Image (cartoon, rainbow, N blue to C red):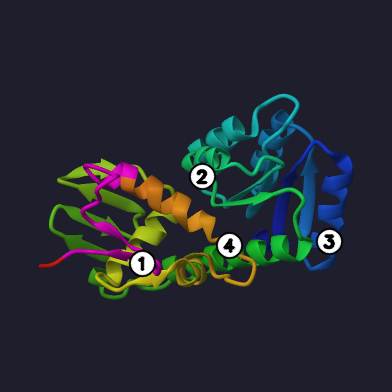
């Protein structure tokens, strides 16, 4: 089985886990269920899944803490499921390295769309890394004090490395590559996540906030990532 078809479902509610597994398998994937965090960590080592669906409420390890532990060793895309839809949960989850977030109850069709979108990104990155390097400047942007290396997944400001999650870096790279151009939240979802029909535009709000907190001197008065009220966001930088 192609690794890009392997999905780990970390969910202690067995009925929900089984429904997700059956639906995913019917669409050509190979899903495995872990009912707690300890089993999940073992399965990740054993199976090396290409995608993880992670419920926040687990019996042994809090889902957010488990997400942090996974991210310390593995860059596998993680989608968090939660019955709590507050913005605080989103910030916590995405801040510890999750790539996406859905609240219960959710649409299986939407879940599948997000899985496909994230796996397309992983597959695309694998293909690029296996090919001879194109002109390197296309994937490294220098803007004054900031350098963004997309392939190396590294951002520095004044020669100090800034820790960003994969999705935070991809969003920052996209905005900075099209500097001074305004994008709607829907356009950013489509460009970075690969979906619009099922996307939650509040995801963009959370990610922009996280990037600003790490990149800007004053997140409430940003120098680089500007809000264009009523439209969206732009990366502002002039030579």
Find the distance from the CA under tag 1 to the CA under tag 3: 33 Å
Towards the viewer: 180 or 111: 180
Find the distance from the CA under tag 1 to the CA under tag 4: 16 Å
Left or right: where does residue 235 sit relative to residue 54?
left
- Marks 3, 2: nearer the viewer: 2
Towards the viewer: 224 or 48: 224
Q: Residue furthest front?
A: 230
Q: Which mark is residue 174?
A: 1
* Residue located at (20% from left, 47% from top): 157
Q: Which residue is mark 4?
A: 118
Q: Which residue is mark 3?
A: 23
Find the distance from the CA under tag 4 to the CA under tag 2: 15 Å
Q: Which mark is residue 94?
A: 2
| Disc with the residue nearer the chain's start (1 vs 3) | 3
Q: Are marks 2 and 1 in contact (CB under 8 Å)?
A: no
Residue 60's place in the image compared with 180, above or below, is above
Left or right: where does residue 173 sit relative to residue 36?
left
The residue carrying pointer 4 sits among few (fewer than 14), some (14 to 19) or many (20 or more) residues within 10 Å by Cα, namely many
């Amino acid at each position: 089985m192609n690794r890009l078809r392997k999905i780990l479902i970390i969910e202690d509610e067995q009925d929900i886990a089984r429904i997700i597994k059956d639906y995913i398998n019917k669409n050509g994937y190979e899903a495995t269920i872990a009912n707690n965090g300890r089993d999940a960590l073992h399965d990740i080592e054993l199976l090396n899944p290409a995608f993880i669906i992670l419920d926040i409420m687990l019996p042994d390890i809090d889902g957010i803490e488990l997400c942090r532990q996974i991210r310390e060793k593995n860059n596998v895309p993680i989608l968090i499921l939660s019955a709590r839809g507050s913005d605080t949960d989103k910030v916590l989850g995405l801040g510890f390295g999750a790539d996406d977030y859905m609240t219960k109850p959710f649409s299986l069709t939407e879940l599948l769309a997000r899985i496909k979108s994230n796996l397309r990104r992983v597959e695309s990155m694998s293909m690029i890394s296996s090919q001879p390097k194109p002109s390197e400047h296309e994937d490294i942007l220098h803007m004054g004090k900031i350098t963004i290396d997309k392939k190396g997944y590294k951002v520095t400001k004044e020669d100090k490395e800034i820790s960003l999650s994969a999705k935070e870096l991809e969003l920052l790279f996209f905005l900075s590559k099209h500097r001074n151009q305004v994008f709607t939240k829907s356009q950013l979802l489509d460009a970075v996540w690969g979906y619009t029909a099922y996307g939650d535009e509040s995801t963009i709000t959370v990610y922009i906030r996280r990037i600003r907190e790490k990149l800007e001197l004053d997140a409430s008065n940003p120098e680089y990532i500007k809000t264009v009220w009523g439209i969206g966001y732009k990366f502002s930088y002039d030579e």
